[in-house]
Amino acid sequence: MGMPGRPGDHQWSQQHLSHYVEGELRPRARRRLDRHARNCVDCGRGIRAMRTLVHALQGLDGLAAVRAPATIFDRVRLAGAGGAPSPHA
Amino acid sequence: MPPLAGQRPPDPADTEASLLARAQAGDIAAFERLSSAYADRLFMLLLRLLGDRGEAEDVAQEVMLRAWQGISRFRGQSSYFTWLYRIAVNEANRALDKRARRPAGMPIGADELQLPDSPLADPSRQAENNELRQALARALAELPPPLRTAIVLRDVEGLSTQEAAEIAGIGQAAFKSRLHQARLRVRAAVGDQALVSSGG
């Protein structure tokens, strides 16, 4: 069985799933992808996968548990011991 | 909003503008206070871009040194945070270039890209998400640096496209193109099945 919609819709949809979930597609392009995905298992799943991916990446928030090393200003202090930075440094 | 009872109102001398002015006049302590506010986040960014804790520590020191040496030229066209992050991305790229030129190119460490579990997360949910987290870490580690930078700044760090593009040093259209490419590659690496089943 062929892919639903116009020829090329499937590949085009697969390439634009990120734009779709980002809300960047123009209305006509969005309708094209919607129409194709309604009848295409791969693209329907692709939309869900892309949404989950973006959500999961946003959730990779371990900030509270990671601290900058205490040495982060060591080179600044070393350089500062020689005086303030020149405006043309 | 007035400060709550028992809270000290912020000292006007400690506002970012004031610290910046003092830092630009050569006050190291003011520079450290100003930059400390972003140090943890900046270090996390370097860890994500470099995938190696030792290298991230070394580059973080270099970023602060460059910022200190250049602060007198900072004119405030962007926020201090954006300016500092841009230095960090440039220094991370420089470190990655150096690494690529080494005879046996050290691969980025996916283990370092994995992030600790949130102490507030439901333990069963943590276990469920652990596999996806590891797969994402591996996929991010495999990306070419420009794509990794784009997806880390926009999706992981949650910056706006405008801010992320500015930090990456490219236009917004080029940035979006990198971001979409990065997402497609990560999606392909992780697999729809893993993503959809984790998404519930």
Image (cartoon, helix red, strand yellow):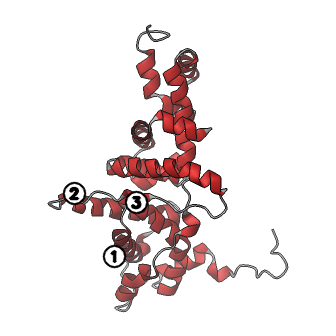
Q: Amino acid at mark 3?
A: Asp
The residue positioned 75% from the left and 79% from the top of the image is B9
Q: Amino acid at mark 1?
A: His
Find the distance from the CA under tag 1 to the CA under tag 2. Answer: 32 Å
Marked residue nearer the N-terminal end (2 or 3): 2
Residue beneath disc 1 = A88
Residue beneath disc 2 = B100
User: Is disc 2 in the same subunit as disc 3?
Assistant: yes
Q: Position of residue B147 (x, y in %)?
A: 37, 46
Quadrant of the rendering where the N terminus of chain A is positioned: top left
Number of other residues with Cα within 10 Å of mark 2, as a class: few under 14, some 14 to 19, many 20 or more: few
Q: Is residue B44 above or below residue B193?
A: below
Find the distance from the CA under tag 2 to the CA under tag 3. Answer: 19 Å
Asked if residue A53 shows in the view, the reply is yes
Q: Which mark is residue B111?
A: 3
User: Is disc 1 in the same subunit as disc 2?
Assistant: no
Determine whether, in the image, residue B199 is placed left or right of residue A2.
right
Determine whether, in the image, residue A34 is placed left or right of residue B103.
right
Q: For mark 2, name the chain.
A: B
Give the secondary structure at mark 1: loop
Front residue (pair B15, B21): B15
Front tag of 1 and 3: 3
Quadrant of the rendering where the C terminus of chain A is positioned: bottom left
Q: Position of residue A70 (x, y in %)?
A: 46, 82
Q: For mark 3, name the chain.
A: B
The residue positioned 56% from the left and 18% from the top of the image is A28
Point out the residue furthest to the right here: B5
Give the secondary structure at mark 2: helix
Find the distance from the CA under tag 1 to the CA under tag 3. Answer: 41 Å
Give the secondary structure at mark 3: helix
Q: Quadrant of residue B104?
A: bottom left
